Amino acid sequence: MTRASRAKRALCGLALLSGAVALAASCVPVTEELNPRGAILIRTEPSPTTRGAPLTTSDGWTVYVEDIVVMALFSAGVGDVGSGNIEEQLFRASEPTEAIIRAVQAGPAAAQLRYTRWRIGRPRSSTEIGAGIDEGLRARFDAVGDGETLGNCGGITPNFRLGPSLHLRARAEKGGRTVRLDLALLRSRIPSMTVRSVDIRANDLTPAPFPIVAEELFKNEQGALVFDDLARADSDGDGEITGQELCDTRVPLVPSQDADASPDADANPDANANPDANANPDANPDAGANADAGPTTIPLVEVLRTRANRLFGP
């Protein structure tokens, strides 16, 4: 050991005994963090239609989204494994919403956003409920969804333990006629998760924007904006489209592009953390199917649910 190294060793020992923190810290060898972590800031970005701007459809309707509220799960994944915490929120989609996913492994990762559902009657924490959600609206998510009590509507067995995922209030006008929607809908029987690829930096906050695109609720399988299909469901002509009417109105089955692109529900890393994930029987597309209606048509409510899978953007 050289004279210089012996002197430094003695000085470090003296610093530790005397409590000289700054000097003692300089004596600690520099090492790399064994498991570097960072965080993701997931932020929703509502489109003009989501914020209430008028939407003109190709079949001549002007649609106004008056309110749209979402029950969603914010999470992150690295490869096929979940990373960091998860955050469940009930939020108004017309306003930007943020969630921070902490302790995500540094490197390539995925920010994730998907629908979830409340277990009916379970106590809620204040962190789960976004600003501006009043008791009446909250209660819509703590009860069965519209159309869900009608018995196997859309091939979905009623579930009296879990609430809906989406509340939509909208009106459409055409040629002096006004039609309104005020519905609380469960998610589609086809599970869907929207993913954004991000590169996590250790000890840093990485942004991950997610658009909220209410226009997708009125876009058919060919990509055209339409409302005639929903308007036809108003069978009694009272200007209000109900869950019962959406179930009774059947339309030709068109293969959905979401079916192949949708991640497998079992591959979702947060499935075990969310008690509702495996409790939902509507993952089975054949459950309670209506054999009398034939295989070539489906209830219109199922079309609307499938479109809702695209709400969080492509």
Image (spheres, rainbow, N blue to C red):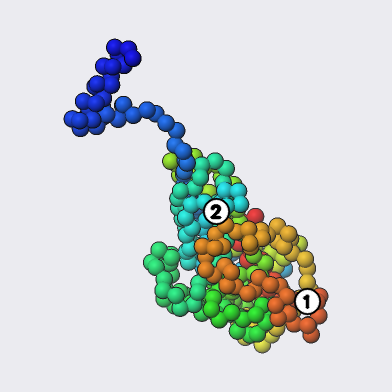
Q: At which x and y percent is residue 240? A: 60, 82
Q: Position of residue 49 (x, y in %)?
A: 58, 62
x 30%, y 30%: residue: 25
Question: Where does label 1 land, which residue?
Answer: 297
Q: What residue is at 50 percent from the left and 74 percent from the top?
A: 119
The alpha-carbon separation of the residues under discs 1 and 2 comes to 38 Å
Quadrant the C terminus occupies = bottom right
| Residue type at tag 2 | Gly
- Residue 202 drawn above or below residue 49: above
**Which quadrant of the figure contains the N terminus?**
top left
In the image, residue 198 sits, relative to residue 279, either above or below, namely above
Q: Nearer the viewer, residue 2 or 68?
A: 2
Q: Is any part of residue 169 visible from this angle? A: no
Quarter of the rendering containing residue 211:
bottom right
Q: Nearer the viewer, residue 128 or 168?
A: 128
**Label 1 or label 2, whichever comes before in sequence order:** 2
Query: Which quadrant would residue 171 be assigned to in this image?
Result: bottom right
In this view, the residue farthest toward the bottom is: 236
**Which mark, residue 82?**
2
Residue at 51% over, 45% down: 105
Q: In the rendering, at what x and y percent does residue 168 appear?
A: 56, 71
